[in-house]
Image (tube, rainbow, N blue to C red):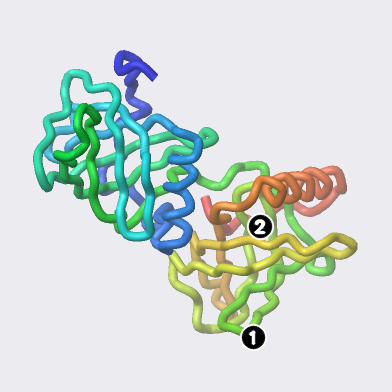
Amino acid sequence: MAAGEVSADFMPEPPGRLLEAHALVGKPLATALLRELAHQRIPIALRRRRDLRTHGFGRIVECRDDALTLDLDEIDPGLPMIAGDDYVAVAYLDGVKIQFDAHLDEDCAAGRRRLLRGPQPPAVYRLQRREAYRVAVATSEGRCVIRRAPGKELAVPLRDLSARGLLITWRDRALPAVGTVWEHARIEFVGRAPLPCTLVASRVDSTGDGSGLVGCEFGPMPPEVERAIQILVNDLQRTPRPAPPGTGPA
């Protein structure tokens, strides 16, 4: 991607618009997303936080559990290498805007390559709301099973489903916090194989009757699981069903 192709789409969202619901604060989720950017060699727009007018394009070339390395390959009008500076990165993965902050130093031993290294970002933001293509789910059709601890699972009614997430009924008075991550969860439907998934609570609403509604986004999933969920949504859409609940993640 040439530097001249920079558009407003690659401008970072200001901090006030970065909703907590969009942050993948769970380290496995955030790291998996950064590694996918590296694996696909996705171009990343990188800007100094103190001066967003200066930008460069590069790619993640190394993503460890505790560190990140970016290789800058296009600089226009120039990205000054300032030791220990704060940067903001923006990229697009499968049409979804990805944004994260990083504290980066220049790698002086990199020779002609312009490498910036730093610790893993504290949060990675996946800036996409749930799609409007949602289908309601009857209580008798499907449920979501959440792993709360080793050997302890909680089955909750599934209210609606989309390719990006789902809505569940939470019957415990202690509602989960936004940003809660449930790994090793699964979606179960009558007559279908269970679909494993990671869920991130993105919206929590109390219904006033001792229960609540919890909207969740999916964490990174293998392509075959993504396809299976899309097929499930398509199949559900073909069957007449009630309108989706009015309360849920935006």
Disc on res. 245: 2
Q: Which mark is residue 239?
A: none
Where is residue 217? Give x, y as percent: 55, 56
Residue for point 25% across, 27% down: 56
Helix, strand or loop under label 2: loop
Closest to the observer: 56 or 171? 56
Residue at 40% across / 55% down in the picture? Answer: 23
**Which one is in front in this view, the residue at disc 2 or the one at disc 1?**
1
Viewer-proximal residue among 36 and 155: 36
Quarter of the image with the N terminus in it: top left
**Residue at position x 85%, y 60% from top?**
192
Above/below status of 52 relative to 191: above
Residue 162, percent from left and from top: 66, 49
Q: Is residue 87 left or right of residue 215?
A: left
How many residues crowd around disc 1 within 10 Å: few (fewer than 14), some, or many (20 or more)? few
Instruction: Work out whether residue 39 or residue 98 is closer to the camera in this orientation and state it.
Output: 39
Above or below, comparing residue 166 to residue 178 in the picture: above
- Element on which disc 1 rests: loop
